Image: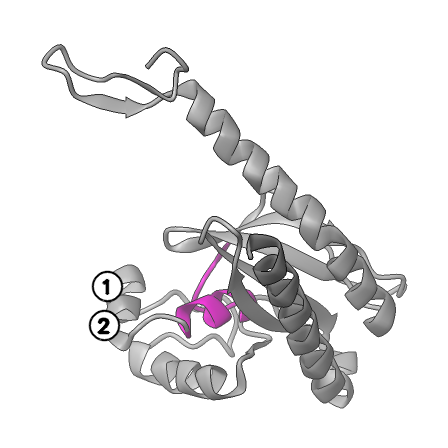
Amino acid sequence: ETEKLVIAATPNGRVRLGPTILRLAASVRSDFIALARPYLERLSEELHETVDLSTVGKDHLVFIDQVIGPQRLRTVSAVGETFPLYCTANGKAYLARLSEQAVEALIGRVYEARTPKTITKLDTLLGELKAARRAGIAFDREEHTAGICAAGVALQDPLGNSVAISVPVPTQRFENRRTLIAERLLATKRAMEMHMNSAAA
């Protein structure tokens, strides 16, 4: 209490997290962004595409960093922008880490159609998540935004929070490059996990 890690929540002695621990949590978030940044930059250089870093906030994603690719035709999202889980590559990568029951409890059984290609039913989505689990990577094929496809992977930061890396690409470039994008994304995820594991050891 002296260090403001907890503060009184009720007169009968219950406590809640204090400002110090909330500041610590925010600094860990910014430390993770700093840790991830060189990996995102390298991936963007390798692919010449935009690379996004997002974190999961209950039933949606929040973009927390981005490296914008050099192509003239490219995709850009604002840091702080929120996206749904069911129709984004990074969201599906996160959902693939959950059990089928947990997916249903989190996002329900029926979803809004963002484009004509959006998956709107749980059963179809679960089929996609099975494939994502096997491959370690998830795809968005114009499901969130017409004209944009993406690949995404999910992992945990050093505090155990779920984060995701995605590469959004205009559809006309995506299919020819999908295998390369997937390979480089998975390699980036492995490199980051190895770095975090060695730092924790």
Q: Amino acid at mark 1?
A: Ala
| Picture quadrant of residue 108 | bottom left
Reading the image, the residue beneath label 2 is: 101
Q: CA distance from mark 1 to mark 2?
A: 6 Å
Is the C-beta separation of discs 1 and 2 under 8 Å? yes
Q: Amino acid at mark 2?
A: Gln
Residue 104 in magenta stretch:
no
Q: Residue 36: x and y, percent?
A: 68, 54
Reading the image, the residue beneath label 1 is: 105
Seen in the picture, residue 96 relative to 200 is either above or below; the reply is below
Classify the position of the C terminus by image quarter.
bottom right
Residue at disc 2, secondary structure:
helix
Which residue occupies the foreground of this view, 117 or 85? 85
Residue visible at 74% across and 52% down in the picture = 37
Q: Residue 48: x and y, percent?
A: 86, 69
| Picture quadrant of residue 80 | top right
User: Which residue in the rendered view is the most extreme toward the front?
Assistant: 201
Residue visible at 49% across and 65% down in the picture = 91
Residue at disc 1, secondary structure:
helix
The numbered mark at residue 55 is: none
Mark 1: give few (<14), some (14-19) or many (20+) Cα within 10 Å.
few
Please indicate, yes or no, whether residue 170 appears anywhere in the rendered image: yes
Q: Residue 15: x and y, percent?
A: 23, 21
Seen in the picture, residue 49 relative to 126 is either above or below; the reply is above
Q: How is the image coloured?
A: one colour
Please report the bounds of the magenta region as a residue range: 83-96
| Picture quadrant of residue 28 | top right
Please indicate, yes or no, whether residue 78 appears anywhere in the rendered image: no
Q: Residue 196: x and y, percent?
A: 60, 58
Which residue occupies the foreground of this view, 99 or 114? 99
User: Which residue in the rendered view is the most extreme toward the left?
Assistant: 12
